[in-house]
Image (cartoon, rainbow, N blue to C red):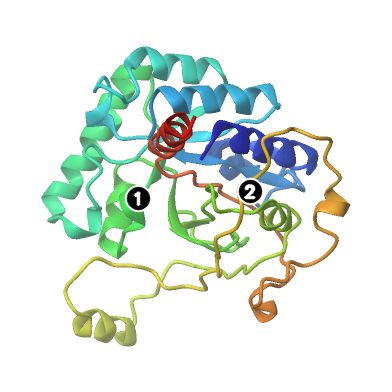
Amino acid sequence: MMLTAFARHCQLIAASGRQTMSLSGYMSTAGSSAASPRPLVITIDDGGGVTMTALRLLVEFGLTATVFVTSSRVDDPGYFHRTDLHRIRGLGIEIGGSGHTGRPLNELARTDVITELTLSRRRLAGSVGDEPRTFAYPGGGYDLSVRKLVISAGYSSACAVREVLSHPHDDRFALARLTVDATTTESRLVAWLGGFGRCEPHPVPGTDRLLRLRRIGRTVGPFRPRLGRTDLRPGGLAPARLDPVDLAAACPGPVDDGDPAGLETAGLETVGCGLTALSSSVEAAQAGSAAGG
């Protein structure tokens, strides 16, 4: 994603009237009288130098976020350095864990999952001064066993992906997120900010006989939740010029993308704008722009 497009997204978010919060901040008040009536959680998975620029843009627009860090990559070339993590904290942005090596946890043995979670918390605590409170499943993959180990490791919440609006009754250890990238049109983003989109509860799965039979009969391979995916069709890049935003004009009503049945008004509790691999996406786009003159 070009930084100009990212800045335009920040402008739309700032103009929406939603209150951006860290994931831990949101979870600490969710369901209570102190909860924000219009919350928004922005999450970014991994990053480097270009991500630092994007985070400064967020702050310039009065926004905050939660950044999930792969602990073994800290100080690697092109990734966050330890000083970057301190700068992120100084911007008022939360740092969460995403495993030690970034391998999908549902594909690992139990002992390896424990190692990933333990090393991640300890290394990040050593880098920033305290242990991360929230977690993002690498690659979005998890199962019941992984979920239990994340809880045992001391995390208070965890993010999946699922590509639907988060629901008030979501499992706090499998929170839904929506991916925002260069193909996300302005009208789509504004619709999400207005609460338009698929929104399905995802409570803690039961352990009844039917579930056990399904797990036994499942073919070997990574667990991929298939719950109400939103039809994301590629659209144009957001314009680079930051004009005044008229939200009503930008999205006068529900988005019509050829699948009207797929969109419905929903009570928006959390939207996680999971800008996955933002650093590499921006760098690739900038390289392409430079090559083209």
Please tell me in which quadrant of the rendered image residue 240 appears.
Answer: top right
- In this picture, residue 40 sits left or right of residue 76: right
Image coordinates for residue 274, horizontal then vertical, percent: 50, 47
Please state which of residues 117 and 261 is positioned toward the viewer in this rendering: 261
Please tell me in which quadrant of the rendered image residue 110 appears.
Answer: bottom left
Give the vertical position of 198 relative to 56 (above or below): below
Q: Which residue is mark 2?
A: 30
Mark linked to residue 137: 1
Real-space Cα distance between discs 2 and 1? 21 Å
Please state which of residues 282 and 151 is positioned toward the viewer in this rendering: 282
Residue located 56% across and 34% down the image: 65
Give the vertical position of 14 relative to 249 (above or below): above
Q: Classify mark 2: residues with Cα within 10 Å, few (<14), some (14-19) or many (20+).
A: some
Please state which of residues 137 and 113 is positioned toward the viewer in this rendering: 137
Image coordinates for residue 216, horizontal then vertical, percent: 19, 82
Amino acid type shown at disc 1: Tyr
Residue located 54% across and 55% down the image: 178
- In this picture, residue 242 sits left or right of residue 99: right
Image coordinates for residue 212, horizontal then vertical, percent: 26, 81
Amino acid type shown at disc 2: Ala
Image coordinates for residue 20, horizontal then vertical, percent: 67, 37
Tell me whether the residue at label 2 lies in contact with that at label 1, contact meaning CB atoms closer than 8 angstroms.
no
Residue located 38% across and 42% down the image: 155
Q: Classify mark 1: residues with Cα within 10 Å, few (<14), some (14-19) or many (20+).
A: many
Kind of element beneath mark 1: loop
Kind of element beneath mark 2: loop
Of labels 2 and 1, earlier in sequence is: 2
